[in-house]
Amino acid sequence: MRFCFFSDDRLGLVEGQAVRDVTAALNALPAARYPYPTHDVFIAGLSSIIERIRMIPDDGERLSLASVSLQCPVRNPGKLIAAPVNYTAHLKEAIADETTFSRAHVQRIQDTGLFLKATSSLIGSGSTIEVRQTGRRTDHEIELAVVIGSAGRDIARWRALEHVAGYCIGLDITMRGPEERSLRKSVDTYSVIGPWLVTADEFGDPAGRGVQLCVNGEARQLANTRDLILDVPALIAFASGFYTLHPGDVIFTGTPAGVGPIFAGDVIEAAIEGLGEFSIEVREG
């Protein structure tokens, strides 16, 4: 299934170029009161949502996908986890460009580890990226985004995909500079996931997926997830050795070579095989 949130928090099923409004299925989620859950209740309750959808009569009405504004498909993640330089070609690119990439941040992922991004930086594909501190370079980075579906700690690699709810296209927008990654990558609007959540059963094996990003029609990044240094199961195992993973946590799996600057007025087009594609505008924040 492909789930989206659209137009003032409506829940939809994406069917080709159409959207079926299934907002009524949200009634399957339990009521909450303070202290509220620190995980995403929609992702945690996804199986109940799917069961409820199957009970809702289909009246045949559909909305055109082009007519709706797509919101972030994961509304309340507990944490955004990101993998730095997780493609060999990008590591070589970073090593070669000392002007852009700080030497302190050019290391193997096995050595440097993962980092966290602020959840306040998260937007959906129907929003706009707002570039801050325009005197500094800001880059695009396309990544496969993995949405955790069930809690786990010290997860074995061979069981890792059992903990995945689904996948999205991710953009890890990056301000260059000497500061820690979490600061430069947590600016408002600098984490994009969309256009919808494709459930793990529909998406299948995350390996061998084509990845492409264009800016203003110019191809910038073209790669395949088979070239990840740490693949999706390895990343889940690695992350869960440090953090308990909860439903709705998002893992940005790393970007391939070809990262480049973006400016106000640019249009980014992002696509991953099996997930679809989206375009998003850039403006000055």
Image: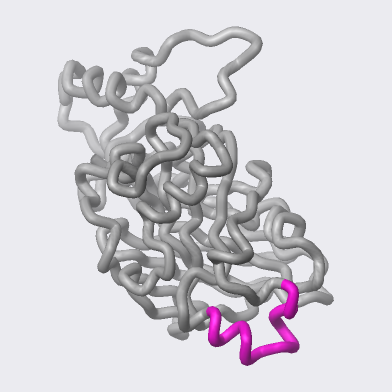
Q: Is residue 281 above or below residue 168?
A: below
The x, y position of residue 225, in whole percent, is 34, 68
Q: How is the image coloured?
A: one colour
The x, y position of residue 62, in whole percent, is 24, 37
The x, y position of residue 98, in whole percent, is 72, 88
Give the left or right position of residue 282, taking residue 248 as reference: right
Image quadrant for the N terminus?
A: top left
Residue 100 or residue 73, whichever sits in front: 100
Residue 251 or residue 278, whichever sits in front: 251
Q: Quadrant of residue 137?
A: bottom right
Residue pictured at 17% horizontal, 25% vertical: 59
Q: Is residue 156 above or below residue 192?
A: above
Residue pictured at 21% horizontal, 42% vertical: 201
Find out whether residue 100 is within the magenta segment: yes
Residue 110 or residue 165, whichever sits in front: 110
Q: Is residue 155 above or below residue 104?
A: above
Residue segment shown in magenta: 91-104
Q: How many marks?
A: 0
Residue pictured at 23% horizontal, 55% vertical: 205
Residue 278 makes an appearance in the image: yes
Residue pictured at 68% horizontal, 65% vertical: 283
Give the left or right position of residue 143, taking residue 55 as reference: right
